[in-house]
Image (cartoon, rainbow, N blue to C red):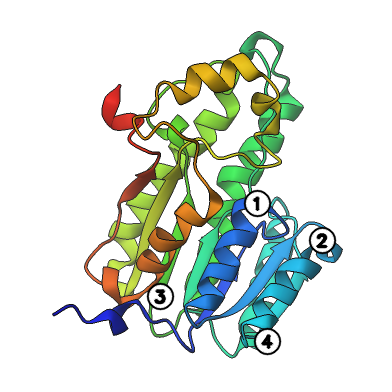
Amino acid sequence: MADLSLFDITGQKALVTGASRGIGQQLAVALARAGADVAITARDAGGLASCAAAIAKLGRKAVPLALDVRDVAQVKAVVDSAADALGGLSILVNNAGVEEVKPSLEVTEAIWDKILDTNLKGAFFCAQAAAKRMAAGGAIVNLCSLTTEVGIPTAVPYGSSKTGLLGMTRALAAEWAPLGIRVNAIAPGYFRTAMTEVFYQNESWQQAMKAKIPMARFGELADLDGIAVFLASPASAYITGQCFPVDGGFLASI
């Protein structure tokens, strides 16, 4: 008989970046529902009110903090503030990310730097700062994407950042295993969020893309709850350095 207590993270202390909306907010609330107290960050702390309220409604502590992950000094300070406010840190979800749809011949240095500095550099320094506060070990969950596995036109900087994030996930997993820190990733398929809304405005794109997904639907944010809690919990104690697609079978069918 399965020991479902392995999925219980009651009392653990989590930090979720980019939690003001979309996937970040969804995962922050999912961790709270599973028992964690959660520090949540966004560039504008005022945008975290609804996420903080949802966490508090579950009886867990919410700590909203302003953070631009491109600022390394700020990353270090905010991660320390989160750990101090929570009384420790055992889970990090690296979710903060940006995208700008642009033909590669029109990508500027500023666009490249904004995307890579947020999605890859920011994730690394968040992980580094968090690892220094995970005295008893912990779990880091990075948000990759389908662009980690396939090339998507008009998404070259984004795909480069997420492919780099997969490499980072594997390297940190190998290096930090002796510290008791597991590092894994989730690769969401097609989910409708504020960042991806530009694609969903095109009805013909929706129909064509849905036809490529074996489960014949786009992802709902709640579809990510289970894998996030699993990777943060003792249920995945012997899993590190892996990336788990949540895509309705898309990658399996191409």
Q: Mark 4 and mark 3: span between their CA atoms?
A: 17 Å
As helix, strand or loop, the secondary structure at mark 2 comes to: helix
Q: Which mark is residue 138?
A: 3
Q: Are marks 4 and 1 in contact (CB under 8 Å)?
A: no
Q: Residues within 10 Å of mark 1 (few under 14, many from 20)?
A: some
Residue underneath mark 4:
85
Q: Label 1 amino acid?
A: Gly
Residue underneath mark 2:
47
Q: Label 2 amino acid?
A: Gly
Residue at point 37% right, 38% down? 248
Residue at point 59% right, 44% down? 119
Q: Using the image as rendered, state which of residue 31 and residue 41 is in the foreground.
A: 31
Q: Are marks 2 and 1 in contact (CB under 8 Å)?
A: no
Q: Label 4 amino acid?
A: Ala
Q: Residues within 10 Å of mark 2 (few under 14, many from 20)?
A: some
Q: Position of residue 128 (x, y in %)?
A: 51, 64
Q: Mark 2 and mark 4: span between their CA atoms?
A: 20 Å
N-terminal of the pair, mark 2 or mark 1, is 1
- In the image, residue 137 sits, relative to residue 72, either above or below, namely below
